[in-house]
């Protein structure tokens, strides 16, 4: 009989499992869903497996760090020793399983097309499981040195005076038990003894040096009434800048004088561009030709006739649109 992914998830949610068991179950679900092709569900299970790997890493690190703070607070022979042995075995199995999952996810990723909608889910599964593998590999190296750290701390702390108050773990030894208390008891404790957890606060000490410097600072200027306005000198300026000056207009007239027959605007602009005509002169030629379509404009600087030639026939370097036919008026 083969369990479905829904049955496995129901089983996990119904039981109160420890972190190790949840890791084993979650990675089994990831393998099962990869084999069945449920890549979105595999990604969700991989995210849960990554969260459990982070919790397990923190759990083992707290045990080892506790030995550094006070080796008397841990039971090495009956508790910590067995915990580290189980952790070594658990991490070794997790490394093998996670390596198999990563290989399976990458093989499936190589087998599907680039435009396949499942590529994102498979990539996330491979990335998340690779993070789990890295964490367990780092934890495996830490476990290899844990016994040596214990022996080193035992040699160091055996000469420490037992009357010295050791630093406590504020999160695990204080905050955790307080959060587990009923509201009334936790509130009463925080009101009665919460100030002792903040540490000493030294009172403010008056500094004569800073006081004398403050008293000797220059007095600020005070302005009574309206502030005087600065006199502004107004003068006229020729702020308008003409792009088509007299020299450009003169060159534009020369262009129309040299036109000896009917020609399209596109051909004329191509000829000017090839001859190295300035861009301002080319714009002036184009603008004066377009002026011929304005019936209200009585000022004419050039005498040319303009007719429609072809729609979208003009595709010059500086303009585009309908092409026009230009005829000099003699």
Image (tube, rainbow, N blue to C red):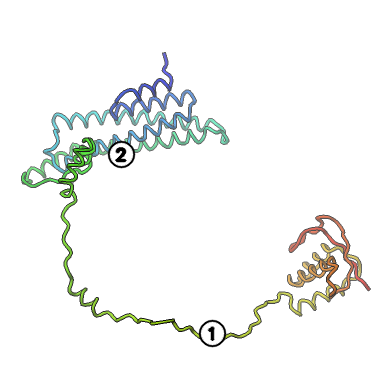
Cα separation between marks 2 and 1: 74 Å
Q: Name the residue located 85 percent from the left edge and 56 percent from the top edge.
A: 310
Q: Is residue 216 above or below residue 113?
A: below
Query: Could you say which is closer to the camera, residue 254 or residue 309?
Result: 309
Q: Name the residue located 74 percent from the left edge and 72 percent from the top edge.
A: 280
Callout 1 secondary element = loop
Side of 316 where 75 appears, left or right: left
Asked where in the image residue 256 lies, by quadrant, the reply is bottom right
Quadrant housing the C terminus: bottom right
Residue lying at the far top in this picture: please name it.
1
Of tags 2 and 1, the one toward the viewer is: 1
Quadrant housing the N terminus: top left
Q: Position of residue 133 (x, y in %)?
A: 36, 35
Write down the residue under mark 2: 138
Q: Name the residue located 30 percent from the left edge and 36 percent from the top edge.
A: 55
Asked where in the image residue 156 lies, by quadrant, the reply is top left
Q: Which mark is residue 232?
A: 1
Q: Is residue 322 above or below residue 8?
A: below
Q: Residues within 10 Å of mark 1 (few under 14, many from 20)?
A: few
Side of 131 where 282 appears, left or right: right
Q: Are marks 2 and 1 in contact (CB under 8 Å)?
A: no
Q: Position of residue 135 (x, y in %)?
A: 33, 38
Q: Is residue 145 visible?
A: no
Asked where in the image residue 166 lies, by quadrant, the reply is top left
Side of 82 where 304 appears, left or right: right
Query: Could you say which is closer to the camera, residue 107 or residue 245?
Result: 245
Callout 2 secondary element = helix
Q: Is residue 7 above or below residue 175?
A: above
The numbered mark, 2 or 1, whose residue comes first in the sequence reads: 2
Numbered-mark total:
2
């Amino acid at each position: 009989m083969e369990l479905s992914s829904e049955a496995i998830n129901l089983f996990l949610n119904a039981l109160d499992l420890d972190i190790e068991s949840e890791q084993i179950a979650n990675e089994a679900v990831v393998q099962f869903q990869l084999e069945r092709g449920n890549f979105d569900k595999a990604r969700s299970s991989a995210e849960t497996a990554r969260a459990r790997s982070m919790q397990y890493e923190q759990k083992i690190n707290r045990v080892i760090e506790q030995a550094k703070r006070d080796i008397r607070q841990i039971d090495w022979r009956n508790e910590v020793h067995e915990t580290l042995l189980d952790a070594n075995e658990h991490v070794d199995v997790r490394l093998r399983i996670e390596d198999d999952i990563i290989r399976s996810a990458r093989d499936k990723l190589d087998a599907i097309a680039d435009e396949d909608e499942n590529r994102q889910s498979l990539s996330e599964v491979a990335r998340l499981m690779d993070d789990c593998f890295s964490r367990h590999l780092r934890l495996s190296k830490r476990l290899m040195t844990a016994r040596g750290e214990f022996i080193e701390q035992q040699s160091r702390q055996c000469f420490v005076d037992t009357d010295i108050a050791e630093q406590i773990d504020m999160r695990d030894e204080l905050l955790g038990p307080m959060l587990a208390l009923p509201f009334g008891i936790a509130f009463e404790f925080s009101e009665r003894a919460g100030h002792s957890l903040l540490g000493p606060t030294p009172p403010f000490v008056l500094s004569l040096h800073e006081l004398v410097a403050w008293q000797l600072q220059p007095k600020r200027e005070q302005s009574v009434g309206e502030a005087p306005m600065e006199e502004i000198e107004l003068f006229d300026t020729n702020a308008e800048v003409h792009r088509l000056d007299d020299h450009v207009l003169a060159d534009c007239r020369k262009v129309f004088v040299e036109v000896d027959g009917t020609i399209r605007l596109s051909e004329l602009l191509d000829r000017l561009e090839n001859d190295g005509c300035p861009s301002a002169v080319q714009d002036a030629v184009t603008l004066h030709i377009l002026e011929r379509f304005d019936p209200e404009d009585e000022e004419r600087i050039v005498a040319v006739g303009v007719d429609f030639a072809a729609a979208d026939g003009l595709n010059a370097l500086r303009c585009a649109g309908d092409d026009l036919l230009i005829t000099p008026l003699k």
